[in-house]
Amino acid sequence: MAGVAVIGQPNVAAQRLDNPIEIPGALSFLAYGHFGSNVHGLDDFPKDTWPDNIELLYYSFHLMITLGTIFIVLMAYAGIQNLRGRLESSRWLLWVLMLAFPFPYIANTLGWMTAELGRQPWLVYGLFARQTAPARSSAAATRCSPSSASSASILCSGCYF
C-alpha cells in the first residue's frame, strides 16, 4: 500500500522523504484502482536509470499539482458565484481571478519540466539513452537548408489557420 506525499523534502542521499505529510494508500488507488496495490519506487530500478535531478522533479510535479488544484477550486467558486449572480459584485474575487491568470501557464510549464526531467537519462525510455544521442555539433544535427527551414515554418504556421 503506497501513500501520496502531499509535501516533504526529498533526501536523495538517504533515499527517503524528510518531513512527509502522506495520504495512506492514495497512490495505490490512483495507479491501480484499489488501495492494497504495490507501487514500485526508485529502489526497484537500477540507479543508472534514475532521473538526474530528483529534487527538481519532485518540486516541479508538486507545484504543478498545487497550482492546478488552486485554479480548479478558484474557478469552481467563481462559477458558483456566477450562478448566484454575485460574481460581478465580488470585487475581491475578480481581483483574485485577475491575479491568478498566470497559474495555468506556470502549471503547464512545470508539467513540461516534470515530463522532461522524469524521462532522463532516456530520450526514448529503455531504447535510446541520452548518452548515445548525437551531439549538437555533429554534421547531421547542424545541416538544415534554408528551403527546408522555410517549408517547415510554413507547414507549422498552416496549423494555426
Image (tube, rainbow, N blue to C red):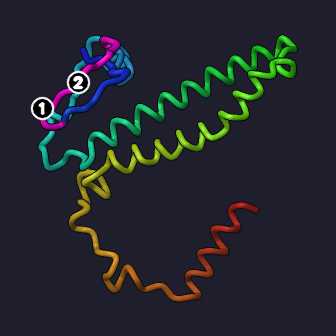
Q: Quarter of the image for the C terminus: give it.
A: bottom right
Q: Residue at x 42, y 86 (%)?
A: 143
Q: Residue at x 23, y 26 (%)?
A: 17
1 and 2 marks in contact (CB < 8 Å) = yes
Q: Quadrant of residue 63?
A: top left
Toward the viewer: 42 or 65?
Answer: 65
93 up-or-down from 124: above or below: above
Q: Residue at x 38, y 79 (%)?
A: 141
Does residue 60 appear left or right of residue 145 in this picture?
left
Instruction: State the extent of the magenta-drawn residues as a range.
Output: 12-25
17 up-or-down from 106: above or below: above
Does residue 124 appear left or right of residue 96 in this picture?
left
Q: Secondary structure at mark 2?
A: strand
CA neighbours of label 2 inside 10 A, class few (<14), some (14 to 19), many (20+)? few
97 up-or-down from 145: above or below: above
77 drawn magenta: no
* Mark sitting on residue 119: none
Residue picked out by circle 2:
18
Instruction: Indicate the amino acid at tag 1.
Output: Ala
Does residue 3 appear left or right of residue 160 in this picture?
left
Does residue 144 appear left or right of residue 20 in this picture?
right
Residue picked out by circle 1:
14
Distance CA(mark 1)–CA(mark 2)? 9 Å
Instruction: Indicate the amino acid at tag 2.
Output: Asp
- Could you tell me residue 11's position as x and y percent? 20, 33
Q: Secondary structure at mark 1?
A: loop
Toward the viewer: 135 or 59?
Answer: 59
